Amino acid sequence: MKNNNIISVITACLLGLTFLSSLPALAESSPANEQAEPEKGPHRGRMLRDDEFAIELAIFETGVPPEFRVWVMDKGQPISPDKVELNIKLTRLGGVVDDIQFNQQDGFLRGDMVIYEPHSFVVTITAKHQGKTHHWKYNNFEGRTTIEQAVADAMEIKTEVASHVTLHQTFPVYGRLMLPPGANRIVAARFDGEIKQLHVKQGDNVKKGQLLLTVESNESLKSFQITAPVEGIITAQKAGAGEQTAGRTLLTISNTSTYIAQLAVYPNDYAKVAVGTPVALSIDGYAREFTGNVAYIEPSVRDDQARLVWVYVDNEKRQLSTGSFVKAEIEFATINVPLAVKRAGLQAFRDFTVVYAKVDKQYEVRMLELGRQDKVWVEVLGGLEPGTEYVSENSYILKADIEKSGASHDH
């Protein structure tokens, strides 16, 4: 049954890829999807004509934020901009409309608002000249694509809603597991004598007060019993029945219920660590993540100038081992930010870092201004409205589809 489920998922993804690649011009990135390359004017703007009346519309962004500039012609000759009343409406994905009015300036009309990224919208133009009204409407899409929901599901394109999050900033450290001081207890006899019976062996778990050895005193020939001073595991057996105690260590009991992760922190990060600082630990051989807090910072440094910090790790299930390698992330800052997105959703688009906003079955780039980050999230300072649904997983599929369409930054 498990294999059948895997085959079904693979089949669905392959069908989704086939369907996606078969759709012509999924990415509506330029008016070329609907018409030939638009005519350009002397200012490299788009020429729009209605009989003998014409305007040249360009987005100007040299030394200023992007803005519309318009030059007007009638019967092939430039005319004064003060003789034209112009309005442009930009309808963006999601229904937002930018309503732009124009003022005359140095032989052209200048829009009264910034044309913010992405420059992707339906453009509606109304121009009035000598009692006549001229209308134009065209699509100027970039970084936009359409994918049916069934295909998005098959390709595991996941989305989330952009909102406030808490960043947990960390830095990596490495170390080993060690038993804490006092975890190893030595078992010896108070009087010299012969070990008559050893009741445990190496590897046995023992309780506090459990009988370990029976010893006959050499002096009194009386037998006495040695019991476990603590709970733990017999980690060393150095004597057997018939041997003399001879004042030596007979057994070692180790309490392995708790380990210490000794982690090396180098000078650049000294100031980021204090007793109580949260730590997330990954231990070689174990899939689960362990958590704890810095409990102690050793006052001296090693030869490599690292200071060792201690983090206690619970070993209730007795699964950990002394000497295991540890990789950890020490948290040095917790920051609440009003808006963030998942780092996994970020992609490059032109010279921008973007996420793909989703509106129904359409997806479009949102150019981001980014701030602080942690391993999962990155703060958004601009370019995205709170509450926007965006692609958080497998956004590379959208990037590839848009690039395949030959999208251009066309004004």
Image (tube, rainbow, N blue to C red):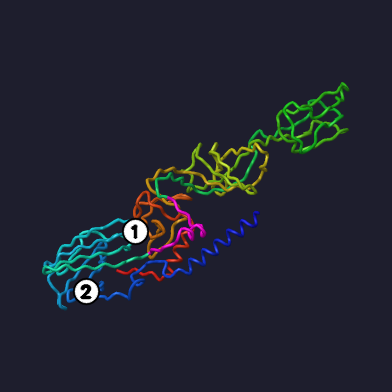
Q: Is residue 219 above or below residue 24?
A: above
Q: Nearer the viewer, residue 154 or 204?
A: 154
Magenta residue check for 12 = no
Q: Quadrant of the C terminus?
A: bottom left
> Does residue 355 appear in this view?
no
Q: Left of 213 or right of it: where is 139?
A: left
Measure how far apart labels 1 and 2 are at the Cα level: 26 Å
> Does residue 350 appear in this view?
yes
The local secondary structure at tag 2 comes to strand
Residue under label 2: 49
Residue at x 64% of width, y 54% of height: 2
Quadrant in the rendering for residue 108:
bottom left
Residue 55 in the image, given as x and y percentages of width and height: 20, 71
Q: Is residue 249 above or below residue 111?
A: above
Residue under label 1: 93
Q: Amino acid at mark 1?
A: Leu
Identity of the residue furthest to the bottom in this view: 76
Mark 1 neighbour class, 10 Å CA radius: few under 14, some 14 to 19, many 20 or more? some
What span is colored magenta in the figure?
143-160
Dot 1 or dot 2: first in sequence order is: 2
